Amino acid sequence: MGFIGIICVIIMTVTLISIESKTKRLIQEQAETNRKLEQLLRK
């Protein structure tokens, strides 16, 4: 288990971090899109 287990944990951690950053970016893009739509609707 030892060495291989450590490598698996590292890979999982890196994967989770990359997924989290992608999710945050998607949420930010969605918020910007909503803002633009609101501005268009108000005009």
Image: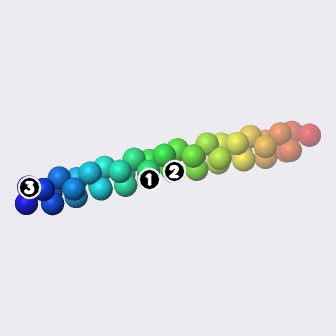
Where residue 36 sits: x, y (%)? 79, 43
How dense is the environment of label 3, judged by Cα within 10 Å: few (below 14), some, or many (20 and up)?
few
> Badges 3 and 2: C-beta atoms under 8 Å apart?
no
Q: Which mark is residue 19?
A: 1
> Badges 1 and 3: C-beta atoms under 8 Å apart?
no
* Tag 2 residue: 22
Of label 1 and label 3, which has the lower sequence position?
3
**In the image, farthest residue toward the right:** 43
How dense is the environment of label 1, judged by Cα within 10 Å: few (below 14), some, or many (20 and up)?
few
Q: Which mark is residue 2?
A: 3
Where residue 33 sits: x, y (%)? 72, 47
Q: Secondary structure at mark 2?
A: helix
Instruction: Give the residue type that dot 3 points to.
Output: Gly
5 left or right, relative to 32: left
Instruction: Give the residue type that dot 1 points to.
Output: Ile
Q: Quadrant of the C terminus?
A: top right
Residue plotted at (22% across, 56% down):
7
